[in-house]
Amino acid sequence: MSTDPEPLSIRDDMIRLGQAMKLANLVEDGADARAVIDAGLVHVNGTPEMRRGHQLRHGDVVDYSGEAFKVVSALQQ
């Protein structure tokens, strides 16, 4: 996992995992997101996450293939 995750700014208080991966440019589309999530390759806060619709909130860290991002909600700033 990256030692310093990149911030991923969102407007609302939550974003779904598949959407966040697309927004962070870790995958091309929803089908790619589904494939890597179903394969168990994505971790949320250090735990494998198998649900593409998992809700991410401010402070959550997502790691995939050596890249990581931390969710930053505009509502929490």
Image (cartoon, rainbow, N blue to C red):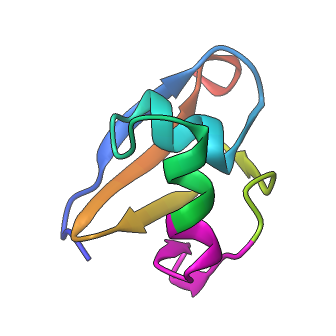
Q: In the picture, residue 11 is in which quadrant?
A: top right
- Residue 59 visible here: no
Residue 55, image x and y in percent?
A: 80, 50
Is residue 43 one of those drawn in magenta? Answer: yes
In magenta segment, residue 44: yes
Residue at 77% x, 29% y is 13
| Position of residue 65 measured from the top left corner of the image (x, y, whole percent) | 27, 70
Q: Which residue is pictured at 79% across the width and 57% down the height? A: 54
Q: Give me the residue at 54% from left, 52% from top.
A: 33
Q: Which range of residues does the magenta coloring cover? A: 36-50
Q: x, y (%) of residue 52?
A: 73, 56
Whether 39 is drawn above or below 34: the answer is below
Q: Quadrant of residue 67?
A: bottom left
61 to the left or right of 34: left
Say which of 60 and 32 sits in front.
32
The quarter of the picture where the C terminus appears is top right
Q: Is residue 40 above or below residue 58?
A: below
Quarter of the picture containing the N terminus is: bottom left
Q: Is residue 39 visible?
A: yes
Please give left or right for residue 69 compared with residue 76 in the image.
left
Picture quadrant where residue 50 is located: bottom right
